Image: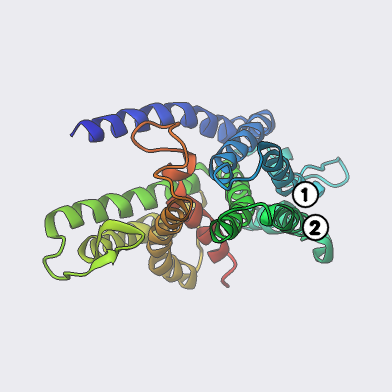
Amino acid sequence: MKNIIQRGRSAIILYAILIPFFLLTFFGQRSGRIIGLGFFIVFSNWALYEVIKHNRLPIWANLILLLTSNIIWIFPTQFYLTSAQNPNIFWDTDKVSLTTDNLLKTIYKDGFLGSNSRFASIEFYVLGIVNIAFFFIFFKSQKNKKFFSSAMSITAFATFIIPIFLKVLFILNAANIYLLFCVFIIPMVTDTAAYFGGKFLGHKLFKRKFAPKISPKKTWEGAIIGYLCGALFVFIVMYIGKLTNNFQFTFYFNYKQIITAVILLPILSTVGDLVFSAMKRTLEIKDFSNLIPGHGGLMDRFDSVSFVTIGATIILLIN
């Protein structure tokens, strides 16, 4: 009971800090988006360092990795360019919401691909080279080479996925705050339903645990109930815009997208939780940090949100 109260108090304080930045990013137009950009970059660096600091590299090496990860925020540079002759809808619009077409353009063309797709992956090449270089530089000096190899695999994964997740989240936040609400609440609904499902029905139908080596407390009953409640919630929040014909509440415009989201997003919520739990077990830690009492670090709290955010955005590509 004491832990639940602590977790609740910490969550209230955390969102009391985050929500003003989310609102400013959405309602503040260009100046608000600039401030929001700075906030999300700081968030990205903090969250990433919490993860990679456990890899047993020297601090200076991890700081280089951290700084290098910001290349995902820097490129493609056309994301930030605007002029009277070539306006950038993301920065120049007077409207507080972007249409789905403009959101797609901002994320895939301006935000990540750039004008020339052949050079779109420069940030990924650079990050890959730096990760591989540090692996070979420090491999021989490691006493536990198996642990170091696993830790560097986690480091490479984190240096890609965390900045990508937060850059996409920033764009979603600026484009439509309802979308931000969706990607945050979907994991909460799935996780909460799974918790209570496991608490009251755990091991009543399935004696075997859901993921005993990664998360021993999870049960199949909890996972199934969490998935069903999550799927129902996804259907409601994703269909309401189509039902009311209100684009501000519309994320997906065709039934293929909606059906895919209903099936996949609750799964991705659980997968995100399990992936980051597996990372912590591999790194031999309980939490990435103690920043948020009762929760751990930023990626302890937003592990599921990261997978749901990226998955929800990829589903937009389905025609």
For the residue carrying disc 2, how many other residues have a C-alpha within 10 Å: few (<14), some (14-19), or many (20+)? some
| Nearer-the-camera pick, 85 or 276 | 276
The spot of residue 59 in percent (x, y) is 66, 37
Residue denoted by label 2: 122
How many neighbours does mark 1 have within 10 angstroms: few (below 14), some (14-19), or many (20 or more)?
some
Indicate the position of residue 64 as horizontal and vertical percent values: 73, 41
Task: Name the residue nearer the viewer: 275 or 30.
Answer: 275
Res 75 label: 1
Q: Position of residue 80 (x, y in %)?
A: 78, 42
Question: Which quadrant of the structure image shows residue 313?
Answer: bottom right
Q: For this view, does 28 lie left or right of residue 276?
A: right
Dot 1 falls on a residue whose secondary structure is loop
Report the mark closest to the observer, 2 or 1: 2
Q: Quadrant of the C terminus?
A: bottom right
What numbered label is drawn on residue 165? none
Inter-mark Cα distance, 2 to 1 = 8 Å
User: As shown in the figure, which amino acid type bears the numbered disc 1?
Assistant: Phe
The correct choice, above or below, for 153 with respect to 255 in the image is: above
**Tag 2 near tag 1, CB within 8 Å:** yes
Residue 15 shown left or right of residue 140 in the figure: left
Vertical placement of residue 52 versus 16, above or below: below
Identify which amino acid the numbered label 2 is placed on.
Ile
Task: Locate residue 206, reporting x and y percent.
Answer: 17, 70
Quadrant in which the N terminus is drawn: top left
Q: Tell me if I can see residue 241 in this picture.
A: no
Tell me: 112 left or right of 266.
Answer: right
Which secondary structure, mark 2? helix
Labels 2 and 1: the sequence-earlier one:
1
